[in-house]
Amino acid sequence: MPPVRSAIIAVAVVLGLTVAACGGSTVGVPGRGSGAAEATGRYTGPVAAPAGDAFYLPPHVLPAGHPGDILWSRRVPPAGPLSGLDIELHQVLYLSTDASGRPDAVSGIVMLPARAARANAPVIGYATGTHGLGDACAPSKSLAAGTDAWIDDFALAAGKGWVMAATDYEGSGTPGTPTYSVGRSEGHAVIDAVRAAQRLSDAGLAHDPKVAYWGYSQGGGGAAWAGELTRTYAPELRTVAVVAGGVPADLIRVSETVDGAAWAGVVFMTALGLDAAYPELRLNDHVVLSARADLDRLRTLCLKEALPPFAGKHIRDILTVDLLHVPQWRARLTENSLGRTPPAVPVFLYHGRKDTVVAFDQAETLAHTYCTAGVDVTWRPYNDDDHDAASYRVMDATAYLTDRFAGRPATSTC
């Protein structure tokens, strides 16, 4: 769900979409964009990246490859807090898998540390908090521009010699509506960003580096989903940890909490995201006529502009039915809630008790669910933190990652 860190989310452009066959199928599939290049048949390696914003448009026909295969990439100069650091930034367009197991493609950005550190560098699949549904909001562009709300995490990781592979998520910056809050889509995108980082030409990374997933808010959900999916979707990765904060684990509970509140806009972003992933939900059939223009515009906005028009709005103000109580919608919301397949690696979960954006109780329930399943959980509630304040608890998060990368055992709070 929402990110936080004040509303400094800068306008961003994503690195397009393209298609990856789950498990490496060898059938070409049509893309959704009007890309500048045509690619057919079997994947044979990256091709030259189209110039400008065409970078983010997938080909009409996509090559059959494996999730994480890079269709194209380009190096961009670090800016803002990353300027002057001994790092490289590469925007990438890579193959992935959507929520229904169909091939798709996603864009993202990879930060490589100083070359001397790369041979032993771990790779973090980094999931950013909510940026908005508009094509201009994709994390890959604002991170490259040095204006992203989460860029300090990258600067911190650079100092530790870590690789950061951040996804834009499906549909962000590329044709189509982003599948916001759709856990399976987000988890696949996070995992495949890690695979793409490992496949960057001349990156100098280890063949089998340690891997972790880290994110907050929407990103906490994406990181946790990556942790839950890795065992079956990416068993070849040497995953050692999941760090997830402000996690929207139960989408129904989170939506109920913000319905009619300042952050109500994320409920409608979630509705648009699920409708994009599952067209049979037919969201447009339930939109109040007077709200149709605002909802259509929501697809084009970044977070700071997206929230005000819906602040204080209830679901009944925008839709003719309460989708939280429609069986077909509840089934999809439940399907994309966490806890059914607990991760097989240690997990650090953190959350502010005063969070009014992502309900605290449902995150605490996730920690208990993981504990009951035998997961090595470190649960860290911050008594005085709201959603924004807890997002800055990065020192605890990175200390946990440092210990897991060093091979030190985690101390469970279960």
Image (tube, rainbow, N blue to C red):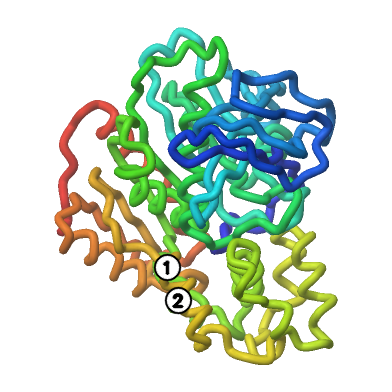
- Residue 68 position within the rendered picture, expressed as x and y whole percent measured from the top left: 52, 32
**Relative to 128, is 205 on the left or the right?**
left
Q: Looking at the image, which is closer to me, 79 or 405?
A: 405
Give the residue type at disc 2: Ala
Q: Which residue is mark 2?
A: 331
Residue 108 position (above or below residue 368): above
Residue 391 shows in this picture: no
- Residue 321 position within the rendered picture, expressed as x and y whole percent measured from the top left: 62, 91
**Relative to 135, is 82 on the left or the right?**
left
Badge number at residue 335: 1
Q: Quadrant of residue 12?
A: top right
**Relative to 50, is 227 on the left or the right?**
left
For image coordinates 23% across by 60% down, the residue present is 370
- Residue 212 position within the rendered picture, expressed as x and y whole percent measured from the top left: 36, 37
Helix, strand or loop at mark 1: helix
Q: Are discs 1 and 2 less than 8 Å apart at CB?
A: yes
Quadrant, the N terminus:
bottom right
Residue 5 shows in this picture: yes
Give the residue type at disc 1: Glu
Quadrant, the C terminus:
bottom left
For image coordinates 30% across by 30% down, the residue present is 238
Label 1 to label 2: alpha-carbon separation = 6 Å
Badge number at residue 323: none
For image coordinates 40% across by 41% down, the residue present is 213
For image coordinates 66% across by 84% down, the residue present is 312
What is the crowding at mark 2: few (fewer than 14 residues within 10 Å), some, or many (at least 20)? Answer: few
Residue 69 position (above or below residue 16): above
